Structure formats: C-alpha cells, structure tokens
Image (tube, rainbow, N blue to C red):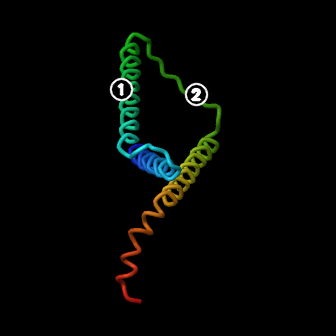
Amino acid sequence: MRLLTRLVLLIVFILLIVRGQEFLAAAGSPLDMTSFFAGVLVTGVFGFVWFLVNNWYSALSGMSRPQSVSMETKQTPARVTIGSIAALFKLLVFLALLGLISFVLVQDRLDDLLRPLAEIVPR
C-alpha cells in the first residue's frame, strides 16, 4: 500500500510539474521543457542523495544507542478499534481526493485522446 501511495503521489507530482511548465510557457516565460525537467531532475537527485545520507547516518549512529520497546495504552479495545476505523476512513477519503485531483489534472489529455475515438465510433 505504501508503494502504491508513493507511485500515485509521484504521478500527481509529475503532472503538476507538467501543468506548471505549460502555465509558465503560456504566460510567456522563456523557460523551455528541457531545462525545466533538467532542473527538476537535478533537484530530485540532490534530494534523494540527501535522504540517503541522513538515513545512513541515523542507521550508523543508531547501533550505539540502547534499544527499548514500550507500549502501553489506557484506551479500551473499543476505542482502539474506533481509532483504527477512523484512520481507515481518513485513508479512503485521502485516496478519493487524490484520485479526483489526478482526474482533473489529466482530464484535458483524456479529452484529446478520446476525441478521435468518438469520431470513429458510429452513433
């Protein structure tokens, strides 16, 4: 589920970048597609390396810290169950909103793709 959420967020992020570039080009910006995506790619690579370095450092320094596990709840089992159901509901609402945003972002492109099919199919 985490992988699917990450992939969906990545796709939405890429579509937002493309829409942003189209908006800038329509506004008369001299920014071209190649330099725009090169900047996004370089920023992504630096961010990825930064997170790898941070994770590497925390994993390396984490070996010297003592480990302790403690879990205690004063909630009743019913409250824990209600909390987990609420979390599932929030996840479903989040995914529905993400799907709606994705649909709005690609709607123009879908219309462009489906228009030739509508002309071919007899009514």
Q: Quadrant of residue 62?
A: top left
Q: Answer yes or no: do the residues labelled 2 and 1 have beta carbons within 8 Å?
A: no
Q: Residue at x 41, y 18 (%)?
A: 58
Q: Position of residue 3 (x, y in %)?
A: 38, 44
* Type of amino acid under label 2: Glu
Marks 2 and 1, how far apart at CA: 37 Å
Q: Residue at x 37, y 40 (%)?
A: 35
Q: Position of residue 53 (x, y in %)?
A: 37, 21
* Type of amino acid under label 1: Val
Q: Nearer the N terminus, badge 2 or badge 1?
A: 1
Towards the viewer: 56 or 21: 21
Quadrant assignment for the C terminus: bottom left
Is 54 situated left or right of 28 in this image?
left
Q: Residue at x 50, y 53 (%)?
A: 26
Q: Secondary structure at mark 2?
A: loop
> Which residue in the rendered view is the most extreme toward the bottom?
123
Q: Position of residue 88 (x, y in %)?
A: 55, 49
Q: Secondary structure at mark 1?
A: helix
Q: Is residue 27 above or below residue 80?
A: below
Q: Residues within 10 Å of mark 2 (few under 14, many from 20)?
A: few
In the rendered structure, find residue 49 and report the number of the disc placed on it. 1
Towards the viewer: 71 or 116: 116
Q: Which residue is mark 2?
A: 72
Q: Is residue 40 above or below residue 71?
A: below
Towards the viewer: 36 or 11: 36
Q: Quadrant of residue 36?
A: top left
Q: Is residue 55 above or below residue 35?
A: above
Q: Nearer the viewer, mark 2 or mark 1?
A: 1
Is 110 situated left or right of 80 in this image?
left
Q: Residues within 10 Å of mark 1 (few under 14, many from 20)?
A: few
